[in-house]
Image (cartoon, rainbow, N blue to C red):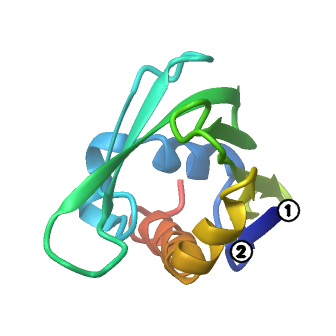
Amino acid sequence: MSHLIESVVVEIPAPAAFVWSVLLDYPNYPRWNPYTLAVATTLEIGTPIDLTLPRPDGGPGTFVSREYLRVVEPPTLLRYDTGHTFPGLLGVRDQVITPLGSDRCSYRTFETFTGEHADAIFAAQGAYVKNGFDSVAHALRDRVEALGGG
């Protein structure tokens, strides 16, 4: 089975390159990102990207999702996936910035879950991931605007 979870699409009044720089400014994630609280990565293809997320059950604490970088195409596409971390499940996440002119762009993120456990993960965590993705989209737009949009 396969399941796709997509964020809302937000328009951002800033150049794509500036939005890209904010998206990859991982040390400042605690200041604005409500879903991905911290990121550790070298941004080299094939290397881990460790994402610190709030617990899906809303309880105290966090957990780290280790994924692997597959595509880094500034300023439009960041892709990573779970690799072999979870046998029977592959999650592939894209974060896409689409230029809409020289001083505007849009942002959206989505993840496709496939494999024998995709149905169970989607049922258990689909709403959590969707809410998280939507919160990132809105928070990224707000962060860019607060920084003056480049």
**Residue 134 in view (yes/no):** no
Q: Is residue 150 left or right of residue 64?
A: right
Q: Is residue 140 left or right of residue 32?
A: right
Asked whether the beta carbons under mark 1 and mark 2 sit within 8 Å of each other, the answer is: yes
* Residue 126 falls in image quadrant: bottom right
Q: Which residue is mark 2?
A: 11
Q: Nearer the viewer, residue 89 or 7?
A: 89
Residue 122, percent from left and from top: 64, 72
Q: Which residue is mark 1?
A: 100
Q: Is residue 106 left or right of residue 12?
A: right
Assess disc 1: are there few (<14), some (14-19) or many (≥20) residues with their C-alpha within 10 Å of its C-alpha.
Answer: some
Residue 150, percent from left and from top: 53, 53
- Rendered view: 142 above or below 80: below
Q: Is residue 128 left or right of residue 16?
A: left
Q: Nearer the viewer, residue 41 or 112?
A: 112
Task: Determine which of the numbered discs, if any, sits on residue 130 in the image.
Answer: none
**Residue drawn at point x = 54 percent, y = 41 percent:** 86
Residue 2, percent from left and from top: 83, 61
